[in-house]
């Protein structure tokens, strides 16, 4: 980008306007209340991020990353945009790149669910697949250098691109929507961590607003984040160890993961995530993704602890994306069997928690 020219400044101004106009056309995402018949006095809420235009929580992150890059003059009218992603962030970034008329290349692990790849292509994005998920960073940097483009680097900038004090971030939205509920200030907010951006935003907002709410991060068992939280000396997983839950959990510690704003982490087995995912989908009458199952499993543990302590109150978690993108993986019994994910017992337990069985 040639900095400071009138043409580039006019283009940047128009680019920001288009993104802000797109936001203004979008309603906020719904907050779904789940009744828990076995736990009177405790209510559970799902912040339904699947209703964004690109179908996931990552739509918020992609918007913030584009605005951050634009206002830093890192992206211009001829910039190729590159991202390393497990899929959903790339889908959302491809949406915004197309809006601005920019070429977009997603560097994704080869095992990324095919419907996510189709969605990236639908928005005009190109796919660069790598066999080893740990090499997505280097591949993205190399492509940015080769094309003279910009590597968005969600794993570095997620925690700073979003205004955590407010300005319509997800935390502000949650607390505003809870205002008229029986227990308006949740005891817990539960989310996952892929970049760490969402947990950083929520944790900082809670402290800034002086709420008594605590933040719990649900993390796949094969992720470095919960291990680092317990032992700061752990910054990477052993070779061959990786989460099967797309969108959350990482093999290395990411710069955007801020453990100091997190009160608790709960490690969740893949089978528990997929079992909870399936049970919740039955309850809602529509499918949800695996990371939502991870969140729900952690919520069930917190609810049980509250009930045992005689506590009442509310818990809010995130419905991160819909399940359509996982029809060929998490919702395919043959795929689960091939990958050794025995989810049936976990699904039965979650049906009991939800009062559905």
Image (cartoon, rainbow, N blue to C red):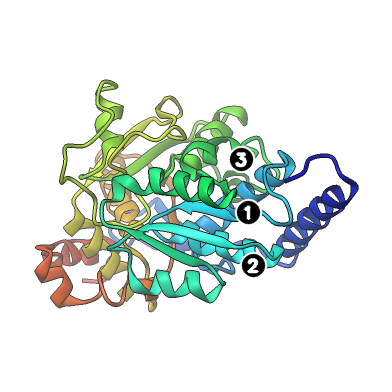
Q: Which residue is mark 1?
A: 63
Residue 176 in view of the camera: no
- Image quadrant occupied by the C terminus: bottom left
Crowding at mark 2 (Cα within 10 Å: few <14, some 14-19, many 20+): some
Q: CA distance from mark 3 to mark 2?
A: 20 Å
Of helix, strand and loop, which one carries label 3? helix
Residue ID for mark 3: 161
Q: Is residue 250 visible?
A: yes
As drawn, the label of residue 98 is 2
Q: Does the residue at mark 1 contact the one at mark 2 (Cβ under 8 Å)?
A: no
Instruction: Estimate the spatial distance between the alpha carbons at disc 1 and disc 2, rounded to whole Å.
Output: 13 Å
Report whether 22 appears left or right of 249: right
Q: Is residue 8 above or below residue 117?
A: above
Which residue is at 55% across, 31% downward? 204
| Residue that lies at the very extreme toward the right in this rendered image | 6
Question: Which residue is at a point 26% across and 56% down the rendered structure image?
Answer: 131
Answer above or below: position of 131 versus 251: below
What's the distance in space between the residues labelled 1 and 3, CA to CA?
Answer: 9 Å
Q: Earlier in the sequence, mark 3 or mark 2?
A: 2
Is residue 245 or residue 302 the one in the foreground? Answer: 245
Q: Is residue 150 left or right of residue 309?
A: right
What is the quadrant of residue 85 in the picture?
A: bottom left
């Amino acid at each position: 980008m040639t900095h400071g020219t009138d043409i580039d400044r006019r283009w940047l101004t128009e680019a920001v306007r288009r993104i802000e106009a797109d936001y203004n056309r979008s309603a906020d995402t719904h907050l779904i209340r789940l009744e828990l018949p076995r736990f009177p006095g405790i209510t559970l809420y799902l912040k339904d991020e699947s209703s964004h235009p690109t179908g996931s929580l990552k739509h918020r992150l992609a918007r913030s990353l584009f605005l951050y890059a634009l206002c830093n003059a890192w992206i211009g009218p001829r910039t190729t945009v590159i991202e390393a992603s497990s899929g959903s962030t790339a889908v959302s970034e491809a949406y915004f790149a197309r809006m601005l008329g920019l070429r977009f290349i997603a560097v994704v692990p080869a095992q990324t669910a095919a419907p996510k790849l189709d969605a990236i292509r639908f928005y005009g994005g190109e796919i660069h697949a790598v066999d080893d998920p740990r090499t997505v960073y280097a591949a993205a940097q190399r492509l940015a250098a080769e094309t003279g483009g910009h590597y968005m680097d969600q794993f570095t900038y997620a925690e700073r691109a979003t205004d955590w004090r407010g300005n319509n971030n997800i935390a502000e939205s949650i607390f505003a929507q809870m205002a008229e509920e029986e227990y308006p200030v949740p005891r817990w907010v539960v989310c996952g961590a892929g970049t760490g951006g969402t947990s950083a935003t929520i944790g900082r907002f809670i402290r800034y607003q002086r709420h008594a709410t605590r933040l719990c991060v649900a993390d796949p068992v094969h992720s470095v984040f919960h291990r680092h939280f317990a032992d700061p000396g752990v910054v990477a997983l052993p070779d061959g160890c990786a989460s099967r839950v797309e969108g959350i959990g990482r093999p290395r510690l990411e710069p955007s993961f801020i453990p100091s704003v997190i009160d608790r982490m709960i490690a969740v087995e893949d089978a528990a995530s997929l079992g909870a995912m399936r049970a919740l989908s039955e309850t809602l009458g529509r499918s949800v993704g695996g990371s939502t199952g991870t969140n729900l499993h952690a919520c069930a543990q917190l609810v049980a602890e509250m009930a045992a302590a005689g506590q009442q109150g509310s818990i809010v978690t995130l419905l991160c994306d819909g399940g359509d993108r996982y029809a060929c993986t998490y919702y395919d019994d043959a795929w689960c069997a091939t990958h050794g994910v025995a989810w049936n017992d976990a699904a039965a337990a979650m049906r009991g928690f939800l009062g559905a069985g």
